[in-house]
Image (cartoon, grey):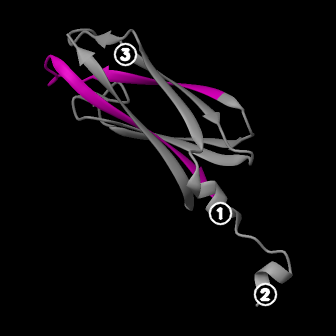
Amino acid sequence: MIKFDELFGKKDVGKELTRSIPYDLKLRFVPFRMDPKSKQPVHLEIEITNLLDEPLLTSVVVQVSKAFGLDAMGLNNTREIRMSYLQHGEKKQLTVDLYSSSRIKSGEFPVQVTAYSHYRDYSHILNSERKRISLRVV
């Protein structure tokens, strides 16, 4: 028995896009550790590459622990960066500054970066890739 969708050539592209890993994420800190007494930020450098054959509407979300802030006052712990469409194989680089708060102590603190692929607009999520990295405070 032939299905109606097969007869008229409709296929579900969403399944192909959600099965595979959509992005290659590379993360690094410059400098690679933080001095708790310094007012200078540590730069989180993010390199994102589209691995799929389709152009993807992309956003990146950076989440840090309460020991850091994504602004000089230390009020924001999450930042979303909307990047528009990434074509097949296209690479983009982002830099996010991390500032220490007054309550920071020595140790290792997690930083989570999630890249989302969207459909229609930024409120509809199709797939994501998540990486965690630790920032060392000495």
Q: Nearer the viewer, residue 105 or 17?
A: 17
First in sequence: mark 3 vs mark 1 = 1
Label 1 sits on residue: 14
Q: How many marks?
A: 3
Residue name at image x 76 percent, y 91 percent: 1
**Residue type marked 2:** Ile
Q: Main secondary structure of the magenta part?
A: strand
The segment highlighted magenta reads 92-121
Residue name at image x 73 percent, y 46 percent: 55
Real-space CA distance between mark 3 and mark 1, rounded to the nearest whole angstrom: 40 Å
Q: Secondary structure at mark 1?
A: helix
**Residue type marked 1:** Gly
Real-space CA distance between mark 2 and mark 1, rounded to the nearest whole angstrom: 21 Å
Q: Which mark is residue 29?
A: none
Q: Quick check: 82 left or right of 28?
A: right
Q: Position of residue 80 (x, y in %)?
A: 48, 42
Q: Nearer the viewer, residue 23 or 28?
A: 23
Label 3 sits on residue: 41
Q: Secondary structure at mark 3?
A: loop
Q: Which of the two marks, 3 or 1, is nearer to us in this view? A: 1
Q: Quick check: 48 left or right of 72?
A: right
Name above or below for residue 11 compared with residue 114: below
Q: Which mark is residue 2?
A: 2
> Which residue occupies the extreme front position in the image?
1
Residue name at image x 30 percent, y 21 percent: 135
**Residue type marked 3:** Pro
**Picture quadrant where residue 7 is located:** bottom right
Q: Position of residue 63 (x, y in %)?
A: 36, 38
